[in-house]
Image: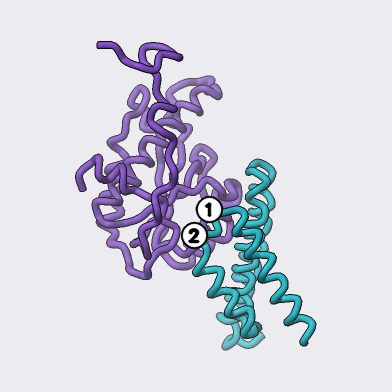
Chain colours: A purple, B cyan
Amino acid sequence: MELFKALKTRRSVRLYSDKEIELSELNSIIEAATWAPTAGNAQPWFFIIVTKHQGLEDISNFSPGIISKPKAAIVACIDISRINKEDITNEDITVSIIDLAMACENIILAALDYNLGTCPVRSFNRVAISELLELPVNIVPQLIITIGYPKNQPKAPKKLDFNQVINYERYGVKSCER
Amino acid sequence: MSDNNKPYNNRINKITTGYIGYVFSSALGLFEEPKEYGPMRLLFAAEKAIELFEELGLCNELLKQLLVTINENKEFLLLDYKSLEKFIEKESIRLSRRVKEI
């Protein structure tokens, strides 16, 4: 799908059909994630793909933000061990989360190429999900992306007017003189 | 417990424990999430409870219909807080009437 069309037609899909997703497509979508920008090339991300029914049921039970039954879930984590510093600060964690967020956007857009819908979910029980997935302490879940073939195409949400979100050269300058 | 019943009993243990996990996770999330999420979380907890009752063979017709209704309106109710309130109020009346009849 052409990029700007993908950006504008992407929706958060919460209702999915029963159609299975090919593992090769899921792997390809994760590969797209790994090409996201990353500070100092740290690549501080780690993904767990869950496709089995029981695993999805268990994750959904501890994720109030998952409101339907996806065919797969991608648990997107930061891997703190990839932060190449002795004393890791809050800023280091923030930067890792920003890197992961950019990778997750790649997942969401790459999924569109396979006609798959996604929904990023932050409302989940982090300690319980870590326990369920047997994550080591350095792998910290930040986002769950549900994925599947959409049952419908949700309507576009109301977006802020373009002029409300942009200034030029410095804050307060609403027009660009060139 | 006979071995024949073990898979079924395991399933019951799994879904009942998982359900309580869902309710606890909803509660935990609400410490940080906007308070407006509360009613929606409870509605979806009710939905999960009905699914649980259905699997256990404990679901009456009203609850089965409620499950269908929640499913059909889910996406819309997520976006419209006032409609969510009206929906919950309407179904509360229906439930209380049913309880009165029993």
| Left or right of B18, for residue A81 | left
Alpha carbon distance from label 1 to label 2: 7 Å
Let me know if residue B45 appears in the view: no
Q: From the top left corner, tell me how far across and down residue A73 is, in percent.
A: 42, 55
The crowd level at tag 2 (other Cα within 10 Å; few <14, some 14-19, many 20+) is some
Q: Tell me residue B69's x, y (percent).
A: 55, 72
Does A26 appear above or below B56? Answer: above
Label 1 CA crowd tier, 10 Å (few <14, some 14–19, many 20+):
few
Please say if A30 is above or below A50: above
Q: In the image, what residue type sits under mark 1? A: Leu
Q: Is residue B96 left or right of residue B78?
A: right
Q: Are marks 1 and 2 in contact (CB under 8 Å)?
A: yes
- Which numbered marker is on residue B79? 1
SS for dot 1 = helix
Query: Picture coordinates of residue A16 (x, y %)?
Result: 40, 64
Chain under label 2? B
Give the percent coordinates (x, y) of residue B93: 72, 73
Q: Quadrant of the C terminus of chain A?
A: top left
The label number, if any, that marks residue B75 in the structure image: 2
Q: Nearer the viewer, residue A43 or A111?
A: A111
List the single residue furthest toward the right.
B100
Relative side of A78 to B6, left or right: left
Residue at image position (51%, 43%) is A136
Q: Nearer the viewer, residue A137 or B31?
A: B31
In percent of the image, x 65 and y 41: which residue is there? Answer: B32
